[in-house]
């Protein structure tokens, strides 16, 4: 009998596979297709012949832990302890899975805000716990009344994702204030803050949970080097948590992964001496603006995009089909792959919206836009 009877293959796998089969321009799964920074590839090439091929300490390569602490201080003015509060993970996905396995018990409830990224629900179900999906408002801001109504003494965790995949929405201060009010009423509840797109924001500045002092002792914050440094295939990220939670998280991590692959850890550590995270938003704002300008004459209506490398678009003036069928036809008849937004909802709510990934070189964006404008 299946432990996850209602979980199928991830939509990102399905759409990328279909894009390959039909030789479509793949703007579905979120990964960059432009070359990785030469400074980083040079470091990796050199490291291959050095003595970096054995297990590293369980929590991470010590110089990398120091640099993560420095980066966190530079970005958010938060001081963290390298020995007790940082864990390098095999991508954000493993950080999220490990955290949930370590901290959620049978019959606990975990609040997930819909539309939501797909890796939150399964680990909750595997704990015999209950995911409680709460819809965001129509403009994708959190609906605090609905969230509070969903909370009870059973609620152990709320998962927040900011900047938000798929909508690109960014929280404002009053959202954190509302969250903090709820947390005061439910002292057992902790926060899992997925901030993998923290360095991809545009006109509005990202507010990190790192800056919310009142909640830091009950908050796990997830980051991804794969996203920040355009190396999604490396599967490397990290989480920051207070010592009492980290102690539990490390108990699971040591038997799931033990330590994350050594070359990537040392390479990222050395690269952090050279790179500035401010470069990342600059790169992506140009890509977002270029892609949106290319689609200006199309029949797609583009929604605001405040962060991430995803652009949501409405196809309501083109077709009445549901978004999954529309995305399939977009591949088979028009040669462009996108992600249907309904798959981010528990009830597959369909608003005729699809998501394009614009983390692509200009030639790819131009090729896709030409096809999209012809529809
Ligand atoms: N969270 C969100 C919101 C994401 O979009 C992704 C996609 N990569 C992840 C987590 C997983 O990141 P990683 O590839 O580092 O596991
Ligand atoms: N985070 C990526 C996206 O939203 C997908 C990563 C994956 O396929 N697991 O497209």
Image (cartoon, rainbow, N blue to C red):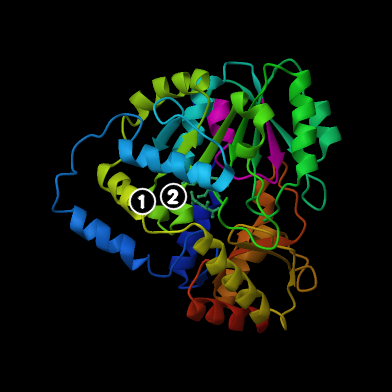
Measured as percent of width and height from the top left, residue 78 is found at 56, 37
- Which residue is at the front of the view, 214 or 148? 214
Which disc, if any, is residue 212?
none
Please identify the quarter of the rendering in which residue 300 is found: bottom right
Q: Residue at x 38, y 38 (%)?
A: 66
Counting the numbered discs, the total is: 2
Q: Secondary structure at mark 2?
A: helix
Q: Residue at x 74, y 37 (%)?
A: 176
Measured as percent of width and height from the top left, residue 187 is found at 71, 17
Q: Relative to 314, does residue 266 appear above or below in the rendering?
A: above
Measured as percent of width and height from the top left, residue 282 is found at 56, 67
- Circle 1 Cα neighbour tier, 10 Å, few/some/many (<14 / 14–19 / ≥20): some
* Relative side of 35 to 282, left or right: left
Please identify the quarter of the rendering in which residue 23 is found: bottom left
Q: Which residues are magenta?
A: 110-125
Question: Can residue 131 be seen by looking at this rendering?
Answer: no
* Relative side of 251 to 189, left or right: left
Q: Residue at x 26, y 42 (%)?
A: 262
- Which residue is at the front of the view, 73 or 84? 73
- Which residue is at the front of the view, 134 or 96? 96
Q: Relative to 55, does residue 162 appear above or below in the rendering?
A: below
Q: Is the shortest distance between ligand 1 and the CB of mark 2 under 8 Å? A: yes
Which disc, if any, is residue 225?
2
Q: Secondary structure at mark 1?
A: helix
| Precedes in sequence: disc 1 or disc 2 | 2
> Do the residues under discs 1 and 2 have CB atoms within 8 angstroms?
yes
Query: Which residue in the protein does label 1 denote?
Result: 234
Q: Residue at x 64, y 81 (%)?
A: 294
């Amino acid at each position: 009998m299946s432990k996850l009877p209602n979980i199928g293959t991830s939509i990102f796998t399905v759409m990328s596979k279909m894009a390959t089969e039909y030789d479509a321009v793949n703007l579905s799964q979120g990964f960059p297709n432009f070359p990785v920074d030469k400074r980083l590839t040079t470091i990796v090439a050199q490291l291959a012949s050095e003595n970096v091929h054995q297990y590293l300490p369980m929590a991470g390569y010590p110089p990398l832990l120091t640099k993560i602490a420095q980066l966190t201080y530079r970005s958010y003015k938060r001081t963290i302890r390298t020995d007790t509060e940082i864990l390098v993970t095999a991508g954000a996905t493993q950080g999220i899975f490990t955290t949930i396995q370590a901290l959620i018990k049978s019959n606990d409830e975990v609040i997930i805000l819909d539309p939501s990224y797909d890796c939150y629900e399964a680990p909750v179900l595997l704990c015999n716990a209950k995911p409680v999906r709460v819809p965001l408002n129509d403009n994708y801001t959190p609906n605090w009344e609905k969230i509070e109504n969903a909370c009870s003494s059973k609620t152990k965790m709320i998962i927040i994702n900011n900047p938000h995949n798929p909508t690109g929405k960014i929280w404002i201060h009053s959202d954190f204030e509302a969250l903090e009010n709820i947390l005061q009423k439910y002292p057992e509840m902790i926060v899992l803050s997925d901030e993998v797109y923290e360095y991809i924001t545009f006109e509005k500045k990202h507010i990190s949970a790192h800056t919310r002092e009142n909640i830091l002792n009950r908050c796990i914050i997830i980051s991804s080097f794969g996203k920040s440094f355009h190396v999604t295939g490396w599967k490397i990220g990290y989480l920051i948590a207070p010592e009492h939670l980290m102690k539990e998280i490390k108990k699971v991590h040591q038997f799931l992964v033990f330590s994350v692959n050594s070359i990537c850890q040392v390479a990222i550590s050395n690269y952090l001496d050279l790179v500035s995270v401010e470069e990342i938003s600059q790169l992506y704002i140009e890509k977002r603006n270029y892609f949106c300008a290319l689609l200006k004459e199309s029949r797609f209506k583009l929604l605001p995009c405040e962060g991430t490398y995803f652009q949501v678009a409405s196809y309501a003036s083109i077709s009445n089909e549901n978004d999954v069928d529309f995305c399939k036809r977009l591949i088979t008849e028009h040669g462009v792959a996108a992600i249907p937004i309904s798959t981010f909802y528990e009830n597959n709510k369909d608003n005729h919206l699809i998501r394009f990934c614009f983390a692509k070189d200009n030639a790819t964006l131009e090729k896709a836009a030409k096809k999209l404008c012809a529809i």
